[in-house]
Image (cartoon, rainbow, N blue to C red):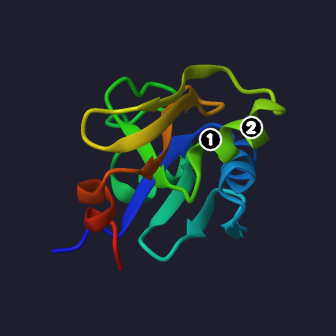
Amino acid sequence: MNLVSVRVITNNVERLISFYELISGASATRYTPDFAEIITPRGTLAVGSERTLSLLGAEGVLAPEANRSVILEFLVKDVDQEFLRLKEQVLVFVQEPTTMPWGNRSLLFHDPDGNLVNLFTPITPEAIRKFLN
């Protein structure tokens, strides 16, 4: 089994996908006004509107802007450089770059829907080996 995609449900697909284009530097594919994806070498971030829930039979199961248990994580080349770049944007940082006990240097902030986002760079030999390939 391979995890290939994470989908975020939102009330404003364009606002959210534009935010992720800004932080990732990648361009999204907008399939419809209700669904877009940013495809990376390791996986895909999908953003769907609340209207797509009926297609999944998930009405009443999922709700936009209600996440309090998931962190979307992105591997970046230099988290400190990303912090300097994103500091100029209208972002509220939860945690400025900090070295974590498991060997990653990490930066945390919220996306426009309140989801927690982590940009990280492995810095210890063990953490670096984990992300080779």
The residues tagged by marks 2 and 1 sit, at their Cα atoms, a distance apart of 6 Å
Does residue 59 show up?
Answer: no
Tell me, for residue 84, which label it has, or none.
2
Residue situated in front as seen by the camera: 81 or 66 = 81
State the SS at label 2: helix
Q: In this view, does 120 lie above or below 66?
A: below
Residue 119, position in %: x, y?
Answer: 52, 44
Query: Alpha-carbon neighbours of circle 1 within 10 Å: few (<14), some, or many (≥20)?
Result: some
Query: Against 127, is 65 above or below?
Result: above
| Residue occupying image coordinates x 44% and y 25% | 66
Q: Which quadrant holds the N terminus? A: bottom left
Residue 107 in picture, x, y percent from top left: 52, 34
Where, quadrant-wise, is the C terminus in this rendering?
A: bottom left
Where does label 1 land, which residue? Answer: 80
Task: Tell me the kind of residue under disc 2.
Answer: Leu
Q: In which quarter of the image is residue 77?
A: bottom right
In this rendering, would 106 be left or right of 76? left
Quarter of the view holding residue 69 = top left
The residue lying furthest to the right in this view is 88
Nearer to me, 40 or 128: 128
Tag count: 2
Type of amino acid under label 1: Asp
Q: Do the residues labelled 2 and 1 touch (CB within 8 Å)?
A: yes
